[in-house]
């Protein structure tokens, strides 16, 4: 990044990359992806995203795991507290097991940890999560916690634990977040996690910095710019290579919009 670009006023240093990502999405994204992109940059009210998801039946999905992408979309545009979500929150609260988990009780423990931590993390941000549900999930995550769970080099458990414990207070929040922050940074530094995946953890935690990690918003934004292809997308990111180029572009756009102001030189 040139010195002249880094010296731009706060929030403007990453504008060209943001504009390229937006243009890519408006040209190549699905109708929903275009709506999400326009909501992220303030061209549309975020409620349009919620309404589009409701019209598509996404808020009525019965499978808990299948709801995660919808909750992530709503979180990305700050719509988890939308009134349309109240029936969904009630349904999910009823579906939690006595031990504090969602999903198939016969599923591997690591899978249930990741699913339950993420669902509860999103539900916390709806501002409607009942204390008994939160406490049940917290108890499950604390009982099953072991640093080895985030030392595997896999992104999913690091992201899930960071998500839940960054938005919920617990006696184990600090040690867990310290472990997660260190392992997230290790994955980023060793190129196991690309900038989009790393930034997504920051965004789900609504944070510009994480305990245990020295990663800054500016460093993540610069990495995103370096990973962006000439057409404005993020074709070489793990998410794009897995067949989700629109989601990869939205990760990049959201990070540049949300983290950009904190990562720009004054």
Image: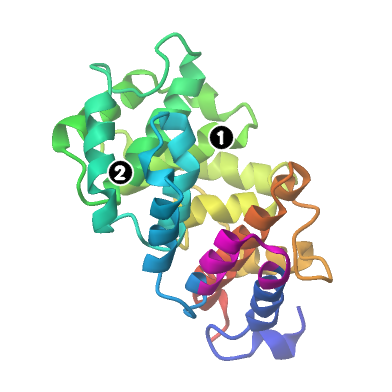
Horizontal side of residue 73 vs 37, given as left or right: left
| Element carrying mark 1 | helix
Determine the image quadrant of residue 172: top left
Distance Cα–Cα, label 2 vs label 1: 18 Å
Whether residue 26 appears in magenta in the rendering, the answer is yes
Horizontal side of residue 195 vs 257, given as left or right: right
Q: Residue furthest top?
A: 106
Between 248 and 178, the one nearer to me in the picture: 248
Q: Which residues are magenta?
A: 25-38
Q: Residue at x 27, y 25 (%)?
A: 95
Between 73 and 260, the one nearer to me in the picture: 73
Between 61 and 213, the one nearer to me in the picture: 61
Q: Mark 2 or mark 1, which is nearer to you?
A: 2
At label 2, counting other C-alpha atoms closer than 10 Å, the crowd grade (few under 14, some 14-19, many 20 or more) is many
Q: Which residue is mark 2?
A: 123
The answer to which of marks 2 and 1 sits earlier in the sequence is 2
Q: Position of residue 258 (x, y in %)?
A: 49, 69
Does the image show residue 175? no
Q: Residue at x 62, y 26 (%)?
A: 152
Between 110 and 7, the one nearer to me in the picture: 110
Q: Residue at x 40, y 21 (%)?
A: 103
Horizontal side of residue 226 vs 97, given as left or right: right
């Amino acid at each position: 990044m040139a010195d002249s670009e880094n010296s731009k006023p706060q929030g403007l240093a990453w504008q060209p990359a943001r504009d390229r990502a937006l243009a890519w999405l408006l040209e190549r994204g699905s109708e929903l992806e275009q709506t999400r992109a326009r909501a992220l940059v303030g061209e549309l009210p975020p409620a349009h995203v919620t309404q589009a998801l409701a019209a598509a039946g996404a808020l009525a999905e019965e499978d808990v795991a299948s709801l995660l992408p919808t909750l992530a979309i709503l979180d990305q545009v700050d719509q988890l507290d939308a009134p349309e979500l109240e029936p969904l929150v009630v349904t999910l609260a009823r579906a939690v097991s006595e031990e504090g988990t969602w999903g198939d009780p016969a599923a591997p423990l690591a899978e249930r940890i990741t699913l339950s931590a993420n669902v509860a993390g999103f539900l916390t941000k709806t501002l409607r999560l009942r204390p008994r549900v939160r406490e049940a999930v917290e108890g499950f995550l604390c009982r099953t916690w072991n640093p080895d769970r985030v030392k595997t080099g896999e992104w999913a458990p690091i992201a899930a634990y960071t998500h839940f414990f960054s938005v919920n207070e617990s006696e184990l929040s600090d040690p867990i977040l310290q472990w997660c922050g260190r392992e997230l940074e290790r994955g980023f530094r060793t190129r196991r996690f690309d900038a989009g995946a790393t930034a997504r953890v920051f965004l789900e935690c609504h944070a510009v910095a994480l305990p245990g990690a020295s990663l800054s918003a500016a460093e993540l934004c610069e990495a995103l710019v370096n990973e962006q292809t000439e057409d404005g997308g993020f074709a070489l990111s793990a998410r794009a290579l897995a067949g989700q180029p629109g989601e990869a572009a939205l990760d990049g756009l959201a990070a540049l919009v949300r983290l950009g102001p904190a990562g720009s030189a004054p």
